[in-house]
Image (cartoon, grey):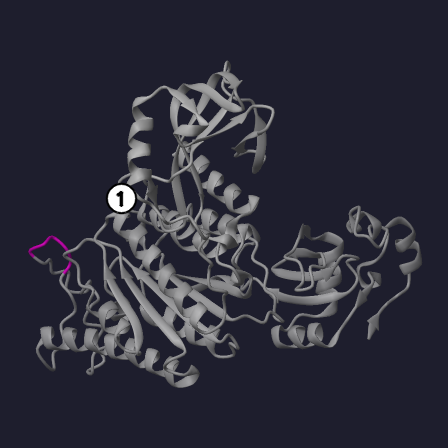
Amino acid sequence: MAFNFSGLLDALRSHPLDGSGDVRHTYAHLDTDNISLVSHAHGRLRREERAINTLELQAAVKHGRKERANPGRDGSQRWRYTHKGVVYITDLTSRHEITSWRLDAVEEDSSPAVEIDDNLSVSSHTVLVVDHSGSMRKPDVPGYTSRTAAVYDCLVREFVEPQMKVVGAGDAVVSLIEMSDGARLVINRHPIDDNLIDLLKLLGDGYAKSHGNYLPALDKVLELFRIDNARKLFLLFLSDGAPSDHNFLECAHGVQVWQPDLLNAKMHRSGRPSLRACGNDSNSKCRQAVKERVQKDCLERLTKLGDMLGRDRVYVGTIAFGPPGDDYQVLQAMAKRLPQGSFQKLGLSVDSLKTAFSSLTSDLTTMRTEMGGTTPLTLRKNRFQETSYHRNLREESLMDDLIDQTSGWDIYRKDEIKKHKYDMQQRRLVEVPLTRGAEGVAVFHYWFSQGVERLVYKCTEIKDYEERGGLKFSSKFGEHLVAKESKHEDFLTTKFQETFCKTQGEAERL
C-alpha cells in the first residue's frame, strides 16, 4: 500500500537510493502530504496501536531530526526521524516505513535516542530497574559525583562490557526503567553493543528526583514482559532504600497516615510536621499496615510475573545500594518470590557494586549458556601446564637484565611488530611508535598470573639487539610491562583486544 506518490520522480533524481545526502533538502519544495511513504503491514499495525497518522510521519521526514538507526536483523541500514514527539524508522531510502512510536510526552532531547526493533527475535531479555529518586543524587560514593553515576558506570563496566564478549551476545537485549514517583521506560529491548554503552553513560549524568515507588516500576515490568517471546527473562532491580509507595496510600479508614498534618500544624520532636492521625485505630498500627500492604502488592506482582511467563523462565536479582542500616526487607522478599533469584546488600561500596554486577553477569551468562543462548567458551590448549622448571626459569629471568631466547623470552624486532594505542577521541586503535631508543619487544613465554578472561605475562621493550649463532640477544629497556592474552580460543581477535584497551584508556581518564 502506498500514499501520495506525486512528486516522487523529481525527488529521486536529486536523492539517490543509496541513502546519501539529506532527504529533508530533497523534499523541501514538496507539501508535507506529498512526501512519499510506502507503508507495510507491520508499520500500519504499530501506527494503529500508537494512534500515529501518516501525516505525522511525513512531517517527521520533512522537518525532523535525522539520525542513523540500529541496522535491521539482516544488517540493512535504516534512518531514524524524530519530530514533535514521534519517532519514525525508515529504510535507507527514507521511503519504506519500518516502525514508529511516540515519546510519551517526554521532551525530545531529555533522554537518549533509543531504537525499538519490534521484530527482534531474542534468546534473553534483561530488564534493569534503577532507582531514580532524589536520594540517588547524594555524592556519598567515593570517586563519583552521585550514587546514580556510580550505578551506571558499574553497569557499563561490569555488566554490559563483559556480556559483549560472550559468543552469541547479539541475540540478547536489555531494557531499562527509571523508578521515581512513576516509572519511565528509557531503553526498550536494545541489543548489547557499543550504542547501549553510550546510552547508559548518558543516563549516568541524569538528575534523580522525588520518591522511589516500587509498584509503578513493577507494573511497567509486567507490561514490558507480557508479550515477550525471549526464552529467558532477567529482572535486575536496584534501589537505595525501601519503597516509598506508602506515602500517599490511605489506610483502611481512608486516611493518608504517612502525610504531614498541615492543618493542625503540629511539629514532631524531630522538627518535622507530625503525620496525620487516624481517629479509628492506633496510628502506628495503621501506618504499619499500609507498609505491609505495599510489600504484599510488590510480591503479588512478582507472583503474577511468574504465573504469566513461567516461574522457571524468570530470574529476579535485587540489589540494595544504600546505607547499610536502612530497611531492605522488601527487596529481600522480592528475590525469594520466584525459584531463581538473589538479593545483595552492598552498603555504598562501589567495589561491592562492581562485584555484585560481575556476579550477576556470570549467573546470566551461565543460564544463557545452559539454555542454548550462547556457545560455551573453549579454553586454549597448552596454556595451563606449569612445572617447577617454568617457575624457576621465571624467577631467574627477574634477576637478569640480559635477554635471550634460551632463557624463556620470545623476542620481536621492531620491524616485526606494530604498537597501537586506543585513541579515546577517535574511538579506535591507532598506531604509535615504540619508546625512543627501543629496538623491539620481549615477552616471557610462561604466564605468571591469570584472571577470569586473560593470562598475564612479563613484558619489556628491549635495546642493543643482536643475533649470534642463530640466537637473538638483547637487554631490557624502559619500564617493566605486562602482556595479556585471552584464555579462550573464541577471543583470539583484534576486537577482544580493542575492547580491553578501550576499558584501560577510560580508566586512565578517571
Q: Which residues are magenta?
A: 269-273
Name the residue furthest front.
469
| Closer to us: 410 or 226 | 410
Q: Is residue 126 left or right of residue 145?
A: right
In the image, residue 271 lies in the stretch drawn in magenta:
yes
Name the foreground residue: 34 vs 344.
344
State the quadrant of the N terminus: bottom right
How many tags in the picture? 1
Task: Give percent across and percent down for residue 65.
Answer: 67, 50
Q: Position of residue 166 (x, y in %)?
A: 48, 58
Q: Is residue 412 above or below residue 250?
A: above
Query: Which of the two residues, 368 or 339, is positioned nearer the viewer here?
Result: 368
Quarter of image, res 130: bottom left
Q: Residue at x 24, y 48 (%)?
A: 349
Residue at (67% x, 62% y) in the render: 72
Point 29% across, 53% down: residue: 355
Counting other residues with Cα less than 10 Å from the Cα at mark 1, is it few (<14), some (14-19), or many (20 or more)?
some
| Quadrant in which the C terminus appears | top left
What is the secondary structure assignment of the residue under circle 1?
Answer: loop
Q: Identify the residue at image location x=44%, y=66%.
A: 126
Residue 213 vs 507, above or below: the answer is below
Q: Is residue 238 visible?
A: yes
- The residue that mark 1 highlights is 141
- Residue 333 is drawn in which quadrant? bottom left
Residue 219: percent from the left, percent from the top? 40, 74
Residue 208 rendering spot, x and y as whole percentages: 36, 52
**Is 382 included in the stretch rendered in magenta?**
no
Q: Is residue 288 left or right of residue 293?
A: left
* Viewer-nearest residue: 504 or 83: 504
Q: Is residue 496 left or right of residue 407?
A: right
